Image (tube, grey):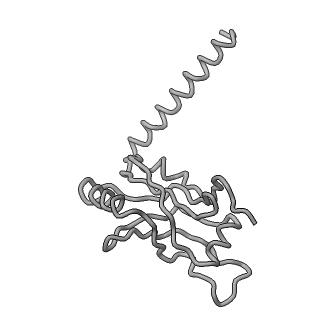
């Protein structure tokens, strides 16, 4: 059977872009057990409480909920266990420097399959304050309104 091609998104953390100001993103492989992969292929995962930590030069994904596989037996996994992320040593070094120096945090944005392999997109982000969130919403609405106005003008409606 041929390997899957392309990117199939399993879960996204939509709230993360609202709560955090994303600086940069990194794609990482993720170490999973067999029943976790089957549960992900069924499209079941939650990233809302997830975060990543760096311990002893390794990056760990914590708080991500992958429910137990329905047809699994005694080999089933724990739903909220810590999962190791696969990154190059240089990427880990850069992430460690930024998280220690400036108060950045690592949060998962998306969990997906890319060419048959499970991947997670983690972001280096800072938390937004309440007024920052309101300002981001106002900017987004202003941009949307200008796009509507230019669209109407190009159609000759105004």
- Estimate the x, y position of residue 137 in percent, counting from the top left: 49, 37
Whether 68 is drawn above or below 46: the answer is: below
**Which residue is depicted at the point 74% across and 81% down?**
71
Whether 65 is drawn above or below 11: the answer is: below
Q: Quadrant of residue 9?
A: bottom right
Is 16 displayed left or right of 6 in the figure? left
**Which residue is depicted at the point 61% across and 66% down?**
45
Q: How many tags in the picture?
A: 0
Task: Work out which quarter of the rendered image holds the N terminus and state it.
Answer: bottom right
Of residues 63 and 36, the one nearer the viewer is 36
**Which residue is depicted at the point 23% across and 56% down?**
101
Of residues 108 and 133, the one nearer the viewer is 108
Q: Which residue is outermost to the left?
A: 101
**Which residue is depicted at the point 64% across and 62% down?**
116
Whether 77 is drawn above or below 147: the answer is: below
Of residues 85 and 14, the one nearer the viewer is 85
- Estimate the x, y position of residue 10 in percent, counting from the top left: 63, 60
- Estimate the x, y position of residue 4 in percent, counting from the top left: 69, 59
Q: Which residue is outermost to the front?
A: 2
Is 113 displayed left or right of 56 in the figure? right
- Estimate the x, y position of residue 24 in percent, counting from the top left: 40, 48
Q: Which residue is outermost to the bottom?
A: 74
Task: Work out which quarter of the rendered image holds the C terminus and state it.
Answer: top right
């Amino acid at each position: 059977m041929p390997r899957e091609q392309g990117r199939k998104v399993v879960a996204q953390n939509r709230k993360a872009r609202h709560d955090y100001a994303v600086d940069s993103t990194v794609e990482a492989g993720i170490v999973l057990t067999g029943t976790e992969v089957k549960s992900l292929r069924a499209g079941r995962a939650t990233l809302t409480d997830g975060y990543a930590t760096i311990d002893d030069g390794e990056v760990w994904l914590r708080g991500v909920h992958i429910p137990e596989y329905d047809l699994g037996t005694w080999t089933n996994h724990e739903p909220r266990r810590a999962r190791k992320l696969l990154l190059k040593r240089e990427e880990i070094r850069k992430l460690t420097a930024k998280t220690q120096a400036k108060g950045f945090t690592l949060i998962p944005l998306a969990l997906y399959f890319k060419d048959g392999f499970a991947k997670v997109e983690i972001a280096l982000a800072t938390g937004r304050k309440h007024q920052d969130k309101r300002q981001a919403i106002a900017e987004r609405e202003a941009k949307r309104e200008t796009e509507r106005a230019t669209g109407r003008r190009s159609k000759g409606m105004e």
